[in-house]
Image (spheres, helix red, strand yellow):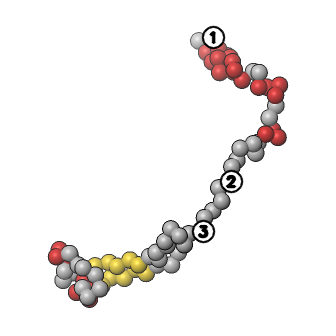
Amino acid sequence: MDFVRVIKNSNDLEKFIDIPEKLKNRKVEVIILPYTDEEDVEQVEKKSLRGVLSKYKNEALRAQESDAWSKAVVDQYENR
């Protein structure tokens, strides 16, 4: 993204911008960034990841999932 950053005397900017009283007669930093209106932004089509990993599923292991946590805890802490 292109931008402009300059240090200017605030008095030079008074004819373009309303300068707060505390910033008058001081050097200020001006940063100019491009403005993008929401209408200008291309709408990116949202894609779903649902089912992407289905080719890796193993139905035989699915039955073991329900008690996998309790078995792992028993295996790790049984003899402590």
Q: Position of residue 47 (x, y in %)?
A: 68, 53
Residue 76 visible in the shown view: no
Q: Give the image quarter of residue 52.
A: top right
In front: mark 3 or mark 1? 3
**Residue labelled with disc 3:** 42
Q: Secondary structure at mark 3?
A: loop
Q: Position of residue 7 (x, y in %)?
A: 32, 82
Q: Residues within 10 Å of mark 3 (few under 14, many from 20)?
A: few
The amino acid type found where label 1 is placed reads Asn
Q: Position of residue 50 (x, y in %)?
A: 71, 44
Q: CA distance from mark 3 to mark 1?
A: 60 Å
Given residues 2 and 19, the one toward you in this image is 19
Q: In the image, is 41 to the left or to the right of 62? A: left
Give the number of the disc on residue 47: 2
Give the number of the disc on residue 79: 1
The amino acid type found where label 3 is placed reads Glu
Q: Secondary structure at mark 1?
A: loop
The amino acid type found where label 2 is placed reads Lys
Q: Position of residue 36 (x, y in %)?
A: 49, 73
Given residues 37 and 9, the one toward you in this image is 37
Q: Residues within 10 Å of mark 1 (few under 14, many from 20)?
A: few
Q: Secondary structure at mark 2?
A: loop
Q: Residues within 10 Å of mark 2 (few under 14, many from 20)?
A: few
